Each structure stands twice: as C-alpha cells, then as structure tokens.
Image: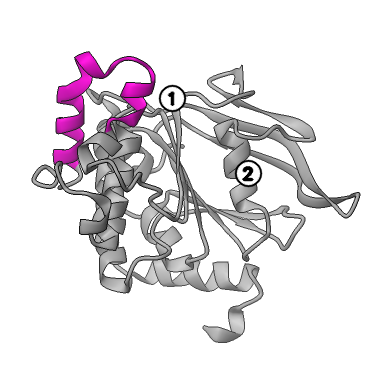
Amino acid sequence: MVSAALELAAEAVEGSVAAGATLEVQGVSHGFVLHNEILPVLHDITLRADPGEFVALLGASGCGKSTLLRLSAGLDRPRRGHLQMDGVAITRPHPSRVIMFQDPTLFPWRTVWDNAAIGLEARGELRHGRSRVDEVLSLVGLDNFGRAYPHQLSGGMAQRAALARALVNDPRLLLLDEPLGKLDSLTRLTMQGELTRLWQQRGFTVLMVTHDVEEALLMAQRVIVFSERPARIRADLRVELPYPRRRDDPELLRLRHEALGLLGLEAIW
C-alpha cells in the first residue's frame, strides 16, 4: 500500500522536468585490494528505490555507504552482483545519475554561473541551455550570485552552487554523499529543508548517505540501516510522516530510538 508520503512525492513528480528513476541493487558485494588482500566493504546488498523516492543510507563511518553510492553512480563496478537503473545495467557514469559530495569541489577560477554550467558545456549543450543555468541558480537561491567566485561564498552558498551544478543536468537519480556534513548547524537545518523542497518539486529519486540519524528521519521516506563493515542491511525503516516534519514528533522520536538501537547506540538515548 502506498504511503501518504509516497503519494506526496508522486504528486510532486507530475509536471516536473526530471521524473525519478528506479534504482535496483541486487546481491552486491564489493571490496578493495589492501596489502594484496581483498578488504570486504559490502556484503550481499539488495535494495530498490522507486521513482521519486527519497532513501537514506545510515551507518557508522567506513561501513561502505559511500562505496554503494559510487557503484550506483557507475564510478566503480561491483565485484559481485549488479545494479540497474530503469532495468538497464549501470556500468559507467551517465548525466541522468548525478553524485554530490560533502565538499562542493567548485573550480575556484570559474564563477558560480560557470561552475553550474559545466555539465552542459561538457556535452556541447550550453549554447541552448543558458536559460536552464539561470533557472537552476534561481531555484537554489543564487540568482544574484552568478558572477561571484567560490572564495566569495559561505559554506552553505558553496553547497547551493554544487547543488545547482547537479540540477542543471535534470538528474533522474540524485546521489548525495553527506552533502551537509561540513556545514554549521543552522545552515545545515536550512539546507535540509531546501533539499527536501527541491526533491518534492522536481520529483527525482534520491539516495543519500548520512551519519546523522535525525537528518535521515527528517528528510527520507525510507532509512536503510547498515551494519559495521562489511556492510549488511540491518533494517529498512519506513518514515510515513508528512512534510515538513517536526523533530519532536512522537513517531519520529520512536524511529530515532529504534535506529540508534540498531546502530548499537541505544544507551545515548
């Protein structure tokens, strides 16, 4: 049965430019070579994100969440299992899948506008896509900062510029690797709301990595809790609460308690 939150997301998709994609991860295991041996990172991960769904990956540092994000982006290939987007194998990067990292990674010699336009420029589409850059900068609240350079931006504004660079491509799958992790607490709260608003407005599918239990529960419709490395899925928590969410909502507090217990941190409740 479709939850009320999923229905809201479905309504947001209607009429949007970027309809969300289906992401399927089937039996994925992965590891890295360390001292001539394989260091296992992911073990038999199977999950699915439906079109327009917001899914958070929650777990301890180093457990493999970011590795799964890179595999989903097509930046790496799994040692076992497979990943598909809309039934097509993910074997390499594609503009329909955009990953946003913790650091904005803006080019310091390019203006905010030019940084946002990189994707279109690389594909030879900038000539006909200039209005798209202007539209997205306005969408993230940077329409008056197009001529600014990265060193002139606050941390939150730099992340907005990185988000604009991602959204210019009209991604169907947005992959967020702790994009708010280095922001101050007040800016982080603001950006949580802005990201949620943009997701509802544009209708893309989101897979977000975070260490912050509250952030996951405030933003996502589902929270996948990972074990320690090599990561296994411990739980798939559904957050069937309307947006915007309140931090003192009894159901959110209950889910927070459950998530902390799954992470072995129940004693800090």
Residue projecting furthest to the right: 36
What percent of the width, then of the height, locates residue 31? 78, 46
Quickly name the residue at label 1.
Answer: 96
Magenta segment boundaries in residue numbering: 117-139
Q: CA distance from mark 1 to mark 2?
A: 17 Å
Q: Residue at x 43, y 49 (%)?
A: 221
Numbered circle sitting on residue 68: 2
In the rendered structure, the answer to whether residue 22 lies left or right of residue 27 reads left
Taking 225 as reference, is 122 above or below it? above
Which secondary structure dominates the residues rendered in magenta? helix
Taking 8 as reference, is 104 above or below it? below
Colouring rule applied to residues = one colour
State whether residue 243 appears in this view.
no
What percent of the width, then of the height, locates residue 68? 63, 44
Q: Quadrant of residue 164?
A: top left
User: What's the amino acid at mark 2?
Assistant: Leu
Q: Is residue 144 magenta?
A: no
For label 1, the SS is loop
Q: Residue at x 20, y 30 (%)?
A: 133
